Amino acid sequence: MSVITLTSDWNRDDYYSGAVKGDILSGLPDATLVDISHSIQPFNIAQAAFILKNSYTHFPAGTVHTIWLNSECSKTPVYLAAKYDGHYFISADSGLFGLLFRKDPDMIVTLAGNTGESSFASLKPFTRAACHLASGKDIAGLGDKVEDFSRSTPRRATIDENIITGSIIYIDSYKNAITNITRELFERVGKGRPFEILVQSNHYRINRLNNIYGTTSPGEMLALFNSLDLMEVAIYKGNLADLLNLDTSSSVRVKFRDKNK
């Protein structure tokens, strides 16, 4: 089975997705094409990396993931293919791989055909590479091996004595806000102590963690560790991000205090 996924900042009404799928199926008629998302905010590589990082592991080993962001943004764009964790990834050298991968990939190569002479210059290099890899051919046959690539750095939560300061890194379709505060960090710093979670300001406070959304009454704020083991803040059956005007520049702090205070 040859699986190829598409992630982009296009919308479903544009012709780009149809052109890509047609080009791939012309080269590899038995390919299975899967849309992960075409609703990425324009040029938002952090959002694309978050969605793909938390999706790709559910696909079969050998799946080829094509990422169509920032691929036409320079006169001479550089396109890359990477092998990582048993999967293949094709993207412009935009910094996205630094957000997507937790360690260096097994191999990364440049793709031939980076002419930049078209408004859709990535089409042929990406689809040729996707067909090559999905048909079981070696990544080394695509181009020259490279040791370095552009790396954007993920935002990390910080610790200052008894306070964890994190950032909202993703807002889902229910307008729940996912932070970069991990369960491991919360437990390591907190050591079972009482806490308050401050959302954006001192005005919005949460002092307990839910296991599921439904243990909070509708309309009330809650916090929990989601299936990714990341702290998430929400309003049960409500719209937290819009109500509090939250975005991916907003902060969430956790303040711990001694048990006897």
Image: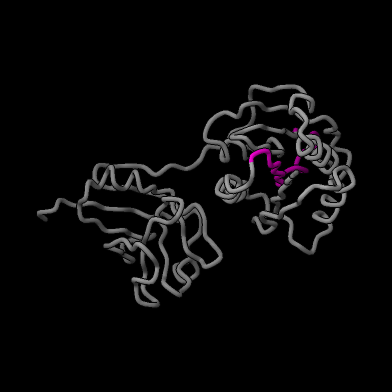
Residue 255 image position (x, y, % from top left): 26, 53
The tally of labels here is: 0
Report the side of 19 relative to 236 (left or right): right
Q: How is the image coloured?
A: one colour
Q: In which quarter of the image is residue 223?
A: bottom left
What residue is shown at x 43% (from left), y 56% (from top)? Answer: 226
The answer to whether residue 142 is left or right of residue 246 is right
Magenta stretch bounds: 61-78
**135 and 77: which one is in front?**
135
On the rendered image, what quadrant is the C terminus found in?
Answer: bottom left
Residue 151 or 107: which is nearer the viewer? 107
User: Furthest residue to the left?
Assistant: 260
Q: Which residue is drawn at 53% across and 61% down?
A: 172
**Above or below, 89 relative to 230:** above
Residue 234 vertical position relative to residue 219 in the rendered view, above or below:
above
Would you say residue 234 sits in the magenta stretch? Answer: no
Q: In this view, does 223 lie to the left or right of 246?
A: left
State the image coordinates of residue 203 (x, y, percent, origin top left). Answer: 32, 66
Please identify the residue farthest to the bottom as the structure is shown: 218
The correct choice, above or below, for 249 with respect to 70 in the image is below
Q: Which of 26 and 240 is in front in this view?
A: 26
The quadrant of the image that shows the N terminus is top right
Expressed as whole percent of the image width and height from the top left, the position of residue 150 reads: 63, 32
Position above or below: 163 against 134: below
